[in-house]
């Protein structure tokens, strides 16, 4: 079941969900709007290797915006730091962002119970689009978990994205054995 605005607020009040900064006007009927931080990154190499650590170059979105281009994957992050201790968070793009031809994640829209971090966004577009730090970029939707949780994400030794980072985090696929 998807949490309503009242359930999200109650979970925040109980400390089961943390959103920092929290803005009451960003709480929707059954979601919470998150914003694009000024931090973007691109991979240094045009060809990426799933078995190797692909390095990124971080940069800041200028105050007057930045034009993203098709054919380039941009890693961004949310302004909001979040923690989710009793629910499963999903990050989806806002419809207004989608109508500009922007995708904010390729496949990684689901978080885990125990996820405590800023969200890294996998931003791509179908035509050039000017984006701005602070713009609404996505919405968090929370789902109830059925049953007890044994292995919280923030307590897993094998979790690759546990390090708190306001900047986008590159793929850690290379840490897997295959």
Image (cartoon, rainbow, N blue to C red):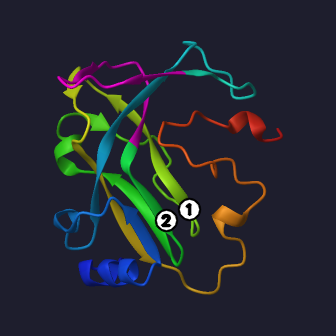
Q: Residue at x 28, y 80 (%)?
A: 4
Q: Characterize the local packing of mark 2: few (<14), some (14-19) or many (20 or more) Cα atoms within 10 angstroms.
A: many
> Does 140 sit above or below residue 125?
below
Gap in Å between the C-alphas at discs 2 and 1? Answer: 6 Å
Q: Is residue 101 above or below residue 115?
A: above
Q: Quadrant of the C terminus?
A: top right
Question: Horizontal placement of 86 versus 129: left or right?
Answer: right
Residue 61 drawn in magenta: yes
Residue 103 position in % (x across, y down):
33, 38
Q: Residue furthest right?
A: 177
- Per the image, label 2 sits on a secondary structure element best described as strand
The dot on residue 115 is 1
Q: Please provide percent x and percent y for residue 145.
A: 53, 80
Residue found 21% across the figure and 42% down from its top: 135
Tell whether position 119 is magenta. Answer: no
Residue found 56% across the figure and 14% down from its top: 44
Which residue is labeled 2 in the image?
83
In the rendering, at what x and y percent does residue 117 appear? 52, 54
* Image quadrant assignment for residue 61: top left
Q: Position of residue 97 (x, y in %)?
A: 22, 42
Q: Earlier in the sequence, mark 2 or mark 1?
A: 2
Near mark 1 (Cα within 10 A), the count class, few <14, some 14-19 or many ≥20, is many
Range shown magenta: 57-77
As displayed, is residue 89 above or below residue 120?
below
Q: How many marks?
A: 2
């Amino acid at each position: 079941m998807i949490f309503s605005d009242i359930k999200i607020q109650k979970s925040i009040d109980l400390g089961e969900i943390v959103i920092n900064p929290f803005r009451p006007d960003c709480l929707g009927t059954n979601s919470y709007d998150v914003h694009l931080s000024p931090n973007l990154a691109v991979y240094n190499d045009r060809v990426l290797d799933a078995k190797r650590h692909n390095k990124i170059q971080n940069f800041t979105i200028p105050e007057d915006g930045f034009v993203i281009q098709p054919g380039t994957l941009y890693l961004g992050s949310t302004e909001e730091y979040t923690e989710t201790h009793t629910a499963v968070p999903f990050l989806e793009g806002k419809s207004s962002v989608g109508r500009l031809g922007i995708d904010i994640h390729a496949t990684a829209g689901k978080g885990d119970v125990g996820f405590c971090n800023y969200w890294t966004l996998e931003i791509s577009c179908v035509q050039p689009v000017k984006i701005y730090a602070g713009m609404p970029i996505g919405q968090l939707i929370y789902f109830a978990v059925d049953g007890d949780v044994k292995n919280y994400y923030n307590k897993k030794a094998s979790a690759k994205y546990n390090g708190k980072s306001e900047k986008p985090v590159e793929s850690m696929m290379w840490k897997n054995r295959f």
